[in-house]
Image: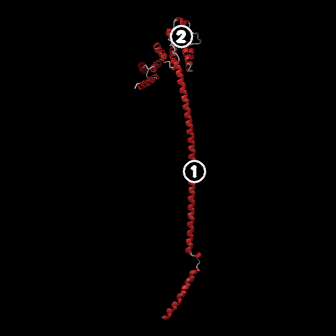
Amino acid sequence: MAVTVNRLLRLVPAVGLMLAGCATTTPPAQDPVLLRLTDMEARLIRMERVIENQSLIELATQVDQLQAQTQELLGQIETLRFESENAGNRQRQLYLDVDQRLQSMEQNQTRLAELPPVAVFDPADATAAQAQDRPVVSGSDQDNYQAAFDLLKNGQYMQSAEAFRQFLVVFPSSPLADNAQYWLAETYYVQRQFTTALPAFELVVNSYPNSIKLPDALLKIGFCNYELKQWPAARAALERVVREFPDTTAARLATQRLERMAQDQV
């Protein structure tokens, strides 16, 4: 028994040397654990690089998109600035143009207001002696009427008034006499000679009661009285237009002026 134990004790160091020899005979490069770890580490490194590359690509793409959007916005801002500047220039030019036109109109009205009143022509006042001295005109009543009316359309009011007065002397019985009297009154009205225009329009109403110009003449009678601040007479003439000639342009204009009068007198 003692011999057996001794033998075992002598074998222990030998087994230890054998195990140590086995352990040292496998090099680290061939160790499966180390190889596995090395492979996993390499794979992780590759994955990190892929992820980093993808992130950089996405960031670069986003940066490019943002730069493109910025350039587009800058272009829109420049366009808006250009349009705004042009709009401002157009508005200033329009304002200057309107201001100049208003000044010109005011100056013209001032000069017209300073003109002496023109005597109203009444065909009924023509005497036999005046009839003998009638001016000599060429053409028909239609030709002379049209010539006088063309002068009125061209803004030659004084010449037009003289032509219509001459027409009424030469052609007192013409079917166009009522129209000629109305437009004669209109030449005074457009020159703001309301005290002269008023009796001229009244002559249309009194001398030509069946004239197609009757509603227009009544309307202008109301307008003249309005400008002269003769409110009752203005209201009476305008209300007559609305009452006797409804559904006409003259009635619509008369209604508007009546409403304006009501506002003015509040």
Q: Which residue is drawn at 58% across and 57% down?
A: 57
In the picture, the quarter occupied by the C terminus is: top left
Type of the residue with mark 2: Val
x, y percent for residue 32: 56, 75
x, y percent for residue 222: 45, 20
Q: In this view, does 109 lie above or below 70?
A: above
Circles 2 and 1: CB atoms closer than 8 Å? no
Which marked residue is nearer to the observer: mark 2 or mark 1? 1
Q: Which colouring convention does the figure follow?
A: secondary structure
Asked if residue 210 can be seen in this view, the reply is no
x, y percent for residue 6: 51, 92
Closer to the camera in the image, 192 or 39:
192
Residue 169 has which mark?
A: 2
x, y percent for residue 71: 58, 48
| Tag 1 residue | 67
Is tag 2's residue or tag 1's residue first in the polypeptide sequence?
A: 1
Q: Residue at x 55, y 71 (%)?
A: 37
Q: Residue at x 52, y 21 (%)?
A: 110
Type of the residue with mark 1: Gln
